[in-house]
Amino acid sequence: MDFATGQHAFAQALLHADAPLPVGLTGASGTADAARFAVYRNNVHVGLTRALAQRFGVTEQLVGAEFFAGMARAYAQDRKPSSPLIINYGDDFPDFIAGFGPAQALPYLPDVARLEAAWTQAYHAADATPLALARLASLAPEALAGLVLFPHPSATLLRSPHPVGAIWAAHQGTELADIEAWQPETVLVVRPEMAVNVHVLPAQDGLFAARLFAGGTLGAAAEAALTEQPTFDFGAALVGLLSLGAFADIHHGDVP
């Protein structure tokens, strides 16, 4: 067996409890020792489960430690870390939760996990100076419609049919807070300076923000928002997003 094949077999045996010992793996006595390997395998699973629990703390609170551990173990069986940086482990855990049968009774759970994943991504994202309102104010009014705004490197926009921002916020204190209204939310996660911030945007600004984050021009995003909500306030929405540090740069839509 060549090294690469042996390495793959070893990793598979670590992640799957029912996998046999890798061929040729022996202990100090020169014989296979399934009990020792089981201890090592368990330590690996415990480490990966703890890493997920640290990153997805609110998700764990929502389902309980025992349920979360089982879900995390099922996830880890087929997904070994792709980087030595364990902080990156679990980027696709929210998508796994969405397809995890026992979690289907909590339809908001995947989006809560997506918010938590976005939080850690924002924390470790590159630094950048947020786009200032003065830069837009210096442009001719007729130029605004064709502008495309680049999201800040730390920014993630999450649109959910559930109040995921309120759910996340309710679990940030020492006591569980009440959720005033169960309604869809658009959440901006961003770190314009030192701290990661989680903002629930005004409901009427959600589509506008989503179109901008998807690369649409200011004009097209505003038109879509006005079509959906005739009372949409373009100026207030744009100033609001800029004040939160959502964007880092601009260019004209006709410039590649």
Image: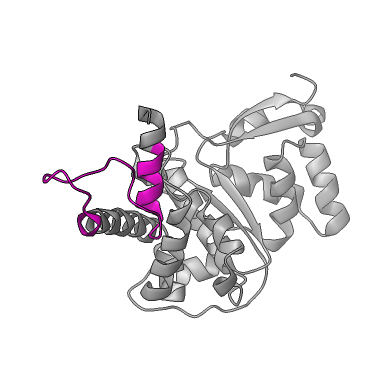
- In the image, residue 47 lies at what x, y percent? 29, 55
Q: Is residue 10 inside the magenta stretch? A: yes
Left or right: residue 24 compared with residue 252: left
Which contiguous range is marked in magenta? 8-36
Q: Main secondary structure of the magenta part?
A: loop
Left or right: residue 2 compared with residue 212: left
Determine if residue 194 is in view: no
Residue found at the very far top of the displayed protein: 255
Q: Nearer the viewer, residue 21 or 194?
A: 21
Residue found at the very far left of the displayed protein: 29
- In the image, residue 212 lies at what x, y percent? 71, 41
- Residue at point 35%, 28% (across, down): 3
- In the image, residue 208 lies at what x, y percent? 74, 49
> Which quadrant would the C terminus be assigned to in this image?
top right
Determine if residue 244 is in view: yes
Residue 53, placed above or below residue 220 = below
Q: Is residue 238 inside the magenta stretch? A: no
- In the image, residue 204 lies at what x, y percent? 73, 59
- Residue at point 43%, 32% (across, down): 127
- Residue at point 35%, 39% (across, down): 85
- Residue at point 82%, 60% (across, down): 231
Q: Nearer the viewer, residue 165 or 105?
A: 105
> Which quadrant would the N terminus be assigned to in this image?
top left
Residue 103, placed above or below residue 12 = below
